Amino acid sequence: MSPGHGAAQPLAAATPGQERHAIQTPWLCLHTHSFRRSSPQSKSHDAPRKPRKRACWIQTTPALRPPPAAPPHLALAAAAGRRWMETLMVDRVHSCLRLFMHRNAVFLCERLCAQFPSETNVQLLATCYLHNDQPYAAYHILKGKKLPVSRYLFATSCFRMNLLREAEETLCPVNEPNVEISSGATGHYLLGVIYRCTGRISTAAEQFTLALTLDPLLWAAYEELCILGVAEDPDECFSESIALRLQQEHASTSTLNSATSNVAQFDTPSPTAAQTSGIMPPPLFRNAHAYQNTMSGEAPTKQKANGANQPLRRKYLDEARLKKVSGRLFNQSSDSMPRRSARLSRDTTMNSNSNTSQFGGNGTDHSSGSRYKVIDEMWTDNISVTSSSVSSVDGRFFEQDKADEFCHKTLKWQLVLGSYWDFCEHLGKVLGFLACLSARYDLGCLAIDGNPLPSDITKLISLVNVQEALEVYRKLPEPQFNTGWVLCQVGKAYFELVDYLEADHYFELAHRLSPCTLDGMDIYSTVLYHLNEEMRLSYLAQDLISIDRLSPQAWCAVGNCFALRKDHETALKNFQRSVQLDSRFAYAHTLCGHEYSALEDYENSIKFYRCALQIDERHYNAWYGLGVVYLRQEKFEFAEHHFRRAFQINPRSSVLMCYLGMALHSLKRNEEALEMMEKAITAVKKNPLPKYQKALILLDLQKHPEALDELERLKEIAPHESSLYALMGKIYKQLNILDKAVFCFGIALVLKPPAADLAIIKSAMEKVHLPDELMEDDL
Amino acid sequence: MESDAEEETAATPAAAAAAGRLKGSPELTVDADMREMAKTAAWSVSSCKAGNGVAALRDDNLDTYWQSDGAQPHLVNIQFQKKVQLQLVVLYVDFKLDESYTPSKISIRAGDGFHNLKEIKTVELAKPVGWVHIPLSGADPRETFIHTFMLQIAVLSNHLNGRDTHVRQIKIYGPRPNPVSHQPFHFTSREFITYSTIR
C-alpha cells in the first residue's frame, strides 16, 4: 500500500496482482448492490458495451487518478479501498437513520466526517443531528457552507432554533438576489413559513404559491395559503394539466440525473426509490440497450438542454416536514420517455446507497398510489455543475456502468411490480381527491376574504359555500371520508356554522376513528363547552392528556373544562400552559384572552387577543373577543369595527351577525342593526339570540307590538328562558297591560333566574303600578 | 359549589348555637353565581404589627394572619374602584389557635368613603373555628345586594377581652356579571347560552 493511504481499509490489496481478488470479500455481500469487478482496461468509454456489473468503487477511481510517480495500480487500490470504506460508512449511516438509530448514526457519521471531510458528508452529519433533535449542532457544522442542500439544512436548523432572520438570509441571501432557492418547492415552502412568522403575508403567499406550482402535492403549502386566506381555485392547483406539465419536467430530469453521479451523493433512502424503480414496464429493458448505444452522443446534449429544468426539481427529504408524494411519480406516467424514468429509478437505487433489499420488500407495498417520501434530487445540482464534464472520460465511464446496473435492475423490477397503467390511474386518483379535499379545505378556511360585498350576495355566498363545502366533502370516497382529518374538517365546518350538534357528532366520530389525531380536538372541546357537556368534556380532556401530555390541544381541552365550571383562574393557567407549549398556536392565545375577559382583566385580554391576531390575522375568534371587550368598555365604534372584521372573515356565523347587530344598536344605527338581525335569523333558525336582540332593538325604537310578537315566537323555541318572560313583563308594563306584566314576571321568577335578576324582577313586580321613571334604576 | 377543604374540622358545641352567634364552618361554601369581588380593591387596616400586615388577609394562606396593634375598634377598609354590588363577606378565624385574639363582635359598614360609612350589619361570634359567612342581604329579595364604593369591617371586641385581634383571611363576594354585555337579564336556558358567545 502506498504510504499516503495509511488509514485505508484492510481490504486494499498489497500487490497489484492481488487487487482484483481482494475486492471480492464477504463484506461486499452486505451491500446487496450487485458488485462485480472489472478490469482496469474497461476505462475506454467510446466502445458500446454489453451490460455488465461492476464494482462500485472502481467507477470512481478514474477521478482519483494518482500522481504519475506512484505505481498506478497501488494508488488505485488504495484509493479504491478508501472510497469503499466511505461508501460503507455512508450506507451504514443511512440504514441507521432509516431504522431510527439516531445516536448510532450520529456517531458513525462523525467518524465518517473526520475520515473523509467533504461537504456532502457534513450534510449527512447535519441530517443525523436534525434527526436526533439537535438543530444547534447542525447549525454549528453547517455555518458558512454554500451548497444548496447545505443551505437548506442550515435554514432548517435555524428555523428550528427560532433564528428566523438567519434562516431567511441563508435561503435568500440579500447580496445574491438571483440565487435560486435550494431544494425547490420545499425551500420555497420554508421561506414562506419564515415570511409568515415574521409578518410578511404577501411575500409568504407568493412563496407558497411558487412552492405549490413546483410541487402540487405539497399540501402544507396549500394549507398555509388557506390560512392566509389567499388560496387559489383548487381546480387550478390540482388539475390534469399540472400533472402533465410535471411529468414532462420529470421526464427531462431523469436523463440529466442519470448522466453523472457521485458515489458519495447524499440521498436518504426511501421507499419511493423502490417504488419508482419498481414501476418499470417491460419495454424499458429493451430501450436500455438502445440508450446505451446512443449514449455517447446523446447524453451531453440532453443534459445541457435539461439543465435549465433541473434547479426547480430539487427536493429534499426533511423528516419533520414532508411526507409528500414525490413529484417524480408523475414522471412515471409519461409514456414518451420510458428510458428516462428507468434511468431515474435506477439512479436512485444506485445513489441512495441503501440496501436494495428494501426495494424488493417495499416495491409491492407502494403500488397503490398512496403517499410517498420525497426522493432527494440534490445531485441534480452536481449534475448541472458537472455537466460540462460530461464529455469527460469519467462521466461517460460512469454512465456506462450505470447502464449495466440498470439493466440488471429492470429485470428484477418488471417482475416485482405490475402495470404502469395502474400507476397512471392511481396518480389521477391522488390528484382527484387532493383537489376535492382542497376545494373543501379552502372553503372551510373561510377563503372569502375581506371585501365587503352587498348583503344579499354575502348571504347567498355564505349559504352557498356551506352547502357546497359539505357537498364536496360528501363526494369523497368512503375510505377517505372516514379518516380523522376529513371528519375533523367537517366538524370544523359545522362549528363555524354554529351548528354544534352536528359538529359534535363528526368530531366524536373523528376521535373514535383516529384517537391520536389531536389537531382538531381543541375545537371539539370548545364544541362540548358550548353544549355544556361537562362529563364528556372532562373525559375528552383526560383522554387527550393521556395521549400526549405535551400537546397544546390537550391543555386547551383541560382549560375549557375548568372554564365550563366557571373556574376561570385555573382555566387561565391551563391555557397559559398551552401557550407555553406552542407559542404559535393562535387559539390558545385567544382562549387566554377569553379567560382574562371573564376575570374582567381587560388589558391582559386585549394583549392576548392581539397576540393571537399577530400569529394568525384571520382568527375571527380573536377579532370577536376584542369586539366584546370594547363593547363592555363601551367603546362602541371599536367594537363595531372588530365585529365587522370577524364577520367578514366568517360570514356564516349567526352569532357574529348578532353581535355586530348589537354593536350597531349601541351606536344607535338601528336600521342596520335590524337588518343584521334579520340576516342572522334567516341564517340559522335554531338560534334564538338574534330574535331576542331584535326584540330589544324594537323595544328601544318603541315598537312594542312587534317586539312582543318576536318574543311570543321565541317562546316556542326556548320555553324555559327566564329573561324572555322578564323582558315581556317589562314591555307589558310599558304598554300598561299590568296584569300580563305581573303574570310574565311571575313566570320569569319561577324559571330560576340568578340572584341578580331575581332581585330586579321581584322589585319590578312590586313596583308594577308605579310609573316607569321610578323604575329606571332597576330595569 | 365552590369549596375549600380545611385542615381543622368544625367543632360545634351545642351551647354556642344560641342567640344567632356564628360559628365557623370548615368549608368555604359559596353559590356558583357569586364571585370574589375584592381583587382590584384597595385594602387598608387601622393598625398592624410588623410582619403581620394587611397582605396576610389576602394571601390565601390560612397560616398567616393580620394582627392589629392599637385601640379598638380595629378596622379593615376595602375601597373599590367603582360602585359594586356585594352580597357576602367571609372571614377565616380560629379560636383554637388564637384564643383571646379571636374577634367576638364584628360590625360591617358601607358607604361612599370614610366620611359617610353607615353600619349595615353586626354579628357576634362564639368561639368560631373556620370560615364565618356573613351575608349582607336584607330580608327583602330586593335588598340582596349592597351597592357601595367602600366597605369597612370593624372588630369591636375580642374573645376573653383581648385587646388585639387576629384575622387570617377575608373574602368578599358579589354577583357575576352577565357574560353577554348590555343585556337587561341573564340567560338561563341552554338554547340561549349556547348561542350567546363564541369561544
Image: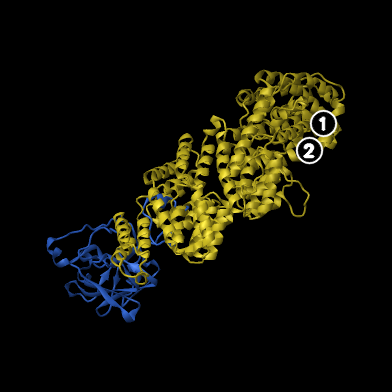
Chain colours: A yellow, B blue
Q: Position of residue B85 (x, y in %)?
A: 34, 68
CA distance for labels 2 and 1: 20 Å
Q: Residue B93 is drawn in which quadrant?
A: bottom left
Q: Residue at x 59, y 44 (%)?
A: A443
Chain ID, mark 2 = A
What's the residue type where badge 2 is placed?
A: Asn
Image: A201 above or below A701 = above
The residue identified by callout 2 is A309
The local secondary structure at tag 1 comes to helix
Would residue A6 be visible to someone looking at this image?
A: no
Residue placed most toward the observer, A123 or A304: A304
Which disc number belongs to residue B43?
none
Residue situated furthest bottom in the rendering: B115
Say above or below: B146 vs A469.
below
Q: Which mark is residue A395?
A: 1
- Local crowd size for mark 2, using a 10 Å CA cut-off: few (<14), some (14–19), many (≥20): some
Residue A371 relative to residue A58: left or right? left
Name the foreground residue: B161 vs A437: A437
